[in-house]
Image (spheres, helix red, strand yellow):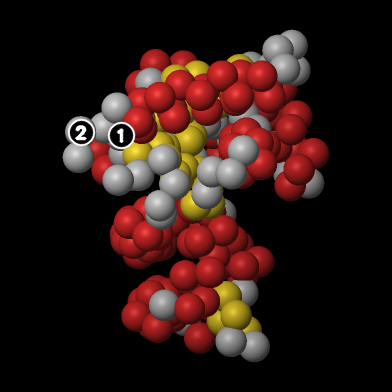
Amino acid sequence: MTLRIGLTGGIGSGKSTVAKVFEVLGIPVYYADEAAKRIMNEDAQLRQQIIQLFGPSAYKNNQLDRPYIASQVFNNKEKLELLNSLVHPATIRDGEQWMRKQTTPYAIKEAALIFESGTQDQLDYIIGVSAPAPLRILRAMKRDGSTRDQVLARMSRQIQEVIKIRLCDFVINNDEQQAVIPQVVTLHEKLLGLASNIEY
């Protein structure tokens, strides 16, 4: 049996960077954002629902037209919530199927919205990646080419970092003061120990 580990953190916390370190250690990682993008193109039922919501312009050359969708939901909270209500359940199902196929002592699901989507109950432990808000804003602006206001708008849709981190079982600090790799290696050893103690 594989331990199911969640990995989460606010926008710009660097959770993908942390996930890559776990992958180097041989741990498989499910990236929920990447999976959602794939599913929106591959899942016939979901495609149909998205076309019903946004019209035929939602897909171009058989691929989701991301700029078009972004323009539709950017200032429309209702449409964004409707889109999420379609995409989240499909991604959660896909993640559960992926997790069942894993054979390593533990496997990781990396997702920004573990608590927001209510999927924490399907995981054995959750790791939070923490970083100060000013640093997170700078990282997100640099990564996505977003404005400060766009980043703050996205942050406002996530649970506050301090609450999110308090809900996690383990925390990795990615504040550019403490080295991340030693923290991940220590946690990796701890998780291997917890996995070896599972009662079958």
Residue under label 1, please give it: 124
User: 132 or 27: nearer the eye?
Assistant: 27
Measure how far apart labels 2 and 1 are at the Cα level. Answer: 13 Å
**Residue displayed at 62% across by 38% down:** 25
In primary-sequence order, the first of circles 2 and 1 is: 1
Horizontal and vertical percent position of residue 70: 59, 61
| Res 168 visible | no
* Residue displayed at 53% across by 69% down: 38
Label annotation for residue 8: none
Q: Of the residues shown, which amino acid type is indicated by label 2?
A: Glu
Q: Is residue 176 visible?
A: yes
Q: Quadrant of the C terminus?
A: top left
Q: From what the image shows, is residue 72 above or below residue 77? A: below
Estimate how packed mark 1 is, as few (under 14), some (14 to 19) or many (20 or more) residues with alpha carbons within 10 Å: few
Q: Are marks 2 and 1 in contact (CB under 8 Å)?
A: no
Which residue is depicted at the point 37% across and 60% down? 101
The secondary element bearing badge 2 is classed as loop
Residue sitting at the far left: 200
Q: Quadrant of residue 182?
A: top right
Image position, residue 138 (x, y; %): 75, 29
**Does residue 116 lie above or below 52 as drawn?**
above
Q: Which residue, given by chain and number where applicable, does mark 2 sit on? A: 199
145 left or right, relative to 185: right
123 vs 161: above or below: below
Q: How many marks?
A: 2
Q: Residue furthest top?
A: 177
Quarter of the figure with residue 105: top left
In the picture, measured across the screen, residue 136 lies left or right of residue 95, that is right
